Structure formats: C-alpha cells, structure tokens
Image: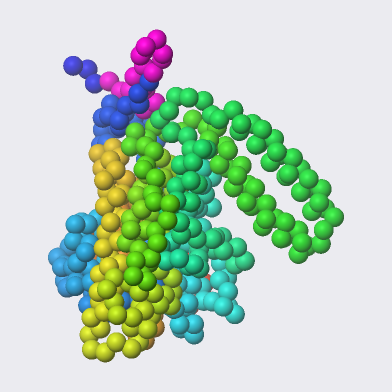
Amino acid sequence: MPNFKLDRRTVLRGLVGGAAVSVALPPLEAFMNASGTAYANGTPFPKRFGVFFWGNGVIPDRWAPTGEGTNWQLSEQLAPLAAHKADINVITGFKVNVKNDRPHGAGPAGLLTGAALRTDMYVAPTVDQVIAKELGGETRFRSLEFGVQRSTRSLSYASPTQMNPIETSPARLFDRLFGEDFRDPNATTGPDPRLPLRRSVLDGVLAQSTALKARLGASDRARIEQHLEGVRSLERQIARLEASPVSLAACALPNAPLADYTDVAGRQQLSAVSRAMSDLLAMALACDQTRVFFDMFTQPLADILIGTASAGHHQLTHDEAGNQPNVHGIILTIMQEFAYLLGALKAIPEGSGTLLDNCVILGTTDCGFGRTHQLNNYPLIVAGKGGGFLKTGLHIKSTTEDNASRVMLTLVNAMGLRRADYGLDTAKSSDRLTAIEAS
C-alpha cells in the first residue's frame, strides 16, 4: 500500500441534522515526517521555555544525587521527581558568579540575567524575556507570569524598569487564557468579527502616540514607549486570533478552576492553587497561546506556612536546628508540585513524544543553602528535551564551581537563539554545557 501524507489542517466534515460539522484529526503519522518529530512539510513542533521558581534554597547535603552521568540516584529531596528522572537533568556544584551582597536577591539576578544587581535593580532582561522577545510574536501571549504564593513579587523583567506582574488567581488566569477571546486552533470557524474594530482602535492610539512623542522630552518619550508595549501586546494577540494557527489536536477548553481558594487553618492552599495553575498552563501551551512562562511557586524570602511546617519557611531555614526536618518537608512539598507540572506537560501527546519533550524548563531557587544564602552548589534542574536539542536523564556535577551561566547559555541556544555568550562581567560565559546537548 503506498505511503501517503495528509495536511495537518485536514478535518472530517459532515452533516448532522442538516447542519455542517467538522472534527479535527489528532496528530496522525500521516501528518508527520518519518521520525515523528515534525510535520511532513518540515514544520517542527513549537518549543516552549519556562522557569519554575521557589524561594529559600535547599539543604545541599540532602539535595545532591549520588553518582554521575547516566548512573545516578535521586536524593532525598529530589525523590518526588522519580517518575520524571528520565526527563530531567540535575546539575550540581555550579556557582552563580556574582557578588553575594543581596541575600536572596543576588542569586536570581545573577542566574536569570547573567549580571549582578546594581542598587537593587536588574540591569538586563531576565532569560525568559530574552527568549520571549524572539518567540513571543508567534503566539497570542508573548509570555505568561503566574504564581502560587499570594502577593508575590515578580522576578520576570522585560527591561530593568519593566517588571512583569504575577497573576496568583487561577480564576483570573483562566479568564485571560480561555475567556471570550479564546479561539480553538482546531476550530474551523472564522475569527471574532469584533477583531477588526479592536485593531482600528489600536491603530488610532498608535497614530496619536506618534504625534504626542514628537512633542515630548526624551524621558517622557521613553515612558510612553514603555507604556505602548502593552498596546503592542494587544496587537500581537489580535494578529494571533486572526491568523490560521497550526493544528494542535490536544488543545481543548480546560475545566474552570475554583473562583477562590480560601485559607485552611491559616494556611494558603498552595498545592491546590499550584495544580490548577499547572493544568491551565499545560493547556495554554498545548493550544499555542504562549511559548514562554514564569511560574513562581514562592518568592525569595517567603516566610509562609507550607505543608505541615511549624513556622514560616524563611524563619525555619535560619532557626531550625539539626538536619532541619521541617525545611526538608517543605522542599519535598515544592518538588511534588514541580513533579505535578512536569506530569501535566508529559500527559499531552505531540507527534511521537509529548509536550514536555518540546519544552526547556529550568527549576531553580534564590540561593544554594537557605541558612547561609550561598551562591555555590546552586540548585539547577533542567526538564525537557527542547525538541531534541538536549539529552536528559543525567546528573552533571562540577567539582570546580563552574559558572552557572554555562547552563543558561545552553538553554538559550536550545531555544534556537544561537547566542555566543551569556551574562556580563564575572558572570559572563562563552562556554555551553555541552554534556547535556544531544549533538
């Protein structure tokens, strides 16, 4: 029987009660290339990048795996990730190579921007926004920033003065992603007829802004330009809604989360909120609503009650004696939620693999050891294969405190940016961590 190919936009059409209906096909082998890694016309599945962040570090002696390379065992604190051991790389012994003069702040800045804080300010965009600038124009949302701890402060910066706000309500995130403007990429109906009107309004705003900027000083022009980035974001969303998107058969409208997650016995429902957010994110990525995200489970210095801990997380990192059983339990809780996120992505099929296979996700925190705020032995987990760019299932250990920017340079290149270096000054690196690259 001759081998034939179908176009990935092929749908089944028919009549029900005299009305025309259509059903999108799943990602059949007939859509794919011979290896099942891309569509037959050569279009690869989109890559996604994300950060899963938590505050207050880890306990290094209970974090580092035993063994190296492919012959390694998960540690006590990494045990919740057992189901995903083949999908992750655990990287230990690396150092964020900036001056550690801002406890809980120097580390994230040095890792996510490759530069030290200057008067408590980031001096460059964070890595998620560097990637979003390249990839975000292809999706409805340039990036998504959300968190679990209420009132959390964002660590995602589009520029030194432009911090991306964090959404902490699953209900509001659902409305934003899957509200009235959501368009199923597998649907055959046309775009919302209101979109041309919205576009004309935006065009008018931008025309007025051009005239206004000509009459303003340099600093005000800069402020106007930053403000109008939000307008451009709306333009990108409208363009995406009007476009004919790729067929993503796994895309479906998810169940709406609860309207509110009230505290139970004075504790935030962190697990419930995190899982609701993870489910929404997984479907947002499956529907190609965005390709970049920043998931803040907790913020640096977070002193909230987590799990069954007897006191706030940050306080315990400094005050709990011995091997810190409460802190250990908190890290286990956080890793359980990271594992849930990876499982949600892994459950969505794409070609011969899963959505997780087409992701690059960095799991990290704000320091190495919470008690000392150290920037060496910095916790780094990389999940996903980046569409085949990365190997997984490895423990990579540095015995010489290698620069963590090597890892970041590798991740940026895995997303297709092809950068020669990452970072500034002492944090700069021109060497990738080739040990996790597939070729």
- Tell me where residue 405 appears, x and y as whole percent: 42, 69
Residue 49, picture quadrant: bottom left
Q: Nearer the viewer, residue 260 or 16?
A: 260
171 within the magenta span: no
Query: In percent of the image, x 51 and y 25: which residue is there?
Result: 190
Residue 394, picture quadrant: bottom left
- Tell me where residue 7 appears, x and y as whole percent: 36, 24
Residue that lies at the very extreme toward the right in this rendered image: 215
Relative height, residue 398 to residue 85 (above, below): below
Residue that lies at the very extreme toward the top in this rendered image: 18
**Residue 38 shows in the view:** no
Relative height, residue 215 to residue 105 (above, below): above
Query: In percent of the image, x 30 and y 67: which residue is there?
Result: 334
Exactly how many numbered labels are in the figure? 0
6 within the magenta span: yes
**Residue 191 shows in the view:** yes
Query: In percent of the image, x 57 and y 42: which residue is there?
Result: 236
Query: In percent of the image, x 42 and y 75: which residue is there?
Result: 302
- Tell me where residue 64 appears, x and y as whole percent: 23, 74
Is 169 left, or right, of 327 in this rendering?
right
Q: Nearer the viewer, residue 176 or 129?
A: 176
Magenta-drawn segment? 4-21
- Tell me where residue 360 appears, x and y as whole percent: 36, 55
Is 307 left, or right, of 169 in this rendering?
left
Residue that lies at the very extreme toward the front in this rendered image: 265
